[in-house]
Amino acid sequence: MSDTNNDIAVEAIKKKLLGKKLTYREILSIMDEISHERLGPVLTTYFTAAGFKEGFSPEELYFMTKAMVDTGEKLHFKGIVADKHSTGGVAGTRTTMILVPIVAAAGFLIPKNSTRAITAPAGTADTMEVVAPVTFDAPQIQKIVHDVGGCIVWGGHLGLAPADDVIIEIEQPLAFESFDKVIVSIMAKKIAVGATHIVIDIPVGPTMKIQHFADAEAIGKKFTYLAKKFDMNIVIDINETYQNAGFGVGPVLEAHDVFEVLEQQSCRSLTLEAKALRLSGKLLNLCIADTPKMKGINGEELAKELLISGKALAKMREIIRAQGGNPDVESVDLVAGKEQFEFPAPKKGRITKIDNKEISMICRILGCPTDKKAGMFLNRKLEEHVDKGDILCTLYSQDAYRLKEAVETIKHIPIYTID
């Protein structure tokens, strides 16, 4: 199909650059060429840039999602298949690793196909990799989910919506993603894993990926439109976000936060727990609505009971064992890098702003996500009062030079605003 298909794809890219709408055949040709790496980086970049500039119509979004799925592998499960995804952009908010064992412990299948970080300090796959391997082929994933009800794996080499993975590589150097591209990327992966019931987390805030509620609502409508087209049940959670839900930023520190919540430690992040329970509850309510034998059960109450009773922790240990990790790992075992620096408050006052984007940049300098033990612990949060010299945050790295560079950078970048 190649030469003809390539010609169709190239003409379609020209058409999109002129702002015209594409047909399914044209989009399928582009996705097929990209997924087989026949289009080349230059033309792929033109298509990606055209989508960023012009956006896509609802029908084009449907065509692109369908084409991404149709040019890749699919996983197959029976019955209700739950899933969750976030539009991202919030460092240190690892709700997925709490939600997945809760939903699996409730008896629903949840094959979570997660991403690695592109511009963030850690993706869910980077964080899960601290406690278990995350790279598996499709038959292995199906077996893990069949055996224990859920998984948290990296989908980068699975061949699920492969064109998306190539486009992500193109976007990475510029660190940009159009909202439409985020929507298509998420939905294509959900459809490919066979998801039937999904919760979408859309954080909105001044230093988040999505900064305005109008954008969040428009994005939510597009998710809902695609879900309807693919006969999926979806619930959208648009939430105002001014700071990281957990204390830690970076793979080990975020894993530590997750296990403190699962273990119900007194020092756990209650904000992270509350968000994870809210999302779990909404997803469970969606699943329960289609499960007659569970009629009348409240999803959030069930989620809370599974967390408090230790059933979610036990399920997480089953998942870790099934993925080849150490099921006995505890929060105290998850220790950050040996090189560290405590950053003091420059003056007395109240913390009025924490800049999520600057935190991400500092953590990348420290070595995240490649250095799993690198990152930042947020000793202080919004609205707290501090005296001059109080520790605001602690930086960690395995590399003394990287730590030194991060310390010099943080002196000139206002992560915390104190008034």
Image (tube, rainbow, N blue to C red):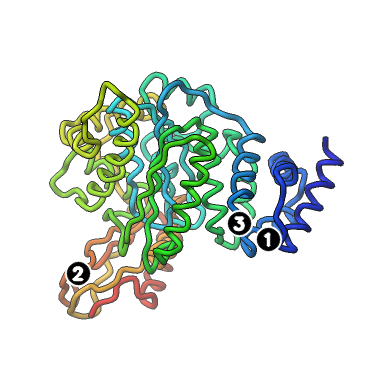
Work out whether residue 43 or residue 140 is closer to the camera in this orientation and state it: 43
Q: Which of the two discs, 3 and 2, labels the residue nearer the N terminus?
A: 3
Secondary element at tag 2: loop
> How would you rate the neighbour count of disc 2 (Cα within 10 Å): few for under 14, some for 14-19, many for 20 or more?
few
Please give the name of the residue rendered at 34% of the width and 47% of the height, measured from the top-left corner: 94
Q: Quadrant of the N terminus?
A: top right
Residue at point 15% right, 76% down?
Answer: 387
Task: Report whether residue 129 is seen.
Answer: no
Q: Marks 3/2: CA distance? A: 36 Å
Residue 55, given in percent of the width and then of the height, sits at: 61, 59
Residue drawn at x 23%, y 62% as measured from the top left: 379
According to the picture, the residue beneath numbered tag 2 turns out to be 383
Q: Three-letter amino acid code at disc 3?
A: Glu
Give the CA distance from mark 3 to mark 1.
12 Å
Indicate the position of residue 243 as horizontal and vertical percent values.
30, 62
Q: Quadrant of residue 346?
A: bottom left
Residue pictured at 49% horizontal, 41% vertical: 227
Residue under numbered circle 1: 50
Looking at this view, name the residue that lies furthest to the left.
266
Q: CA distance from mark 2 to mark 1?
A: 42 Å
The tag earlier along the polypeptide, 2 or 1, is 1
Q: Secondary structure at mark 1?
A: helix
Element type where label 3 sits in the image: helix
User: On residue 171, which mark appears?
Assistant: 3
Mark 2 touches mark 1? (CB < 8 Å): no
Which of pointers 3 and 1 lies earlier in the amino acid sequence?
Answer: 1
Query: Which sits in the foreground, 260 or 238?
Result: 238
Q: Could you say where residue 289 lies in the image, as x and y percent from the top left? A: 31, 31
User: Could you tell me residue 402's position as x and y percent?
Assistant: 43, 62
Residue 391 shows in the view: yes
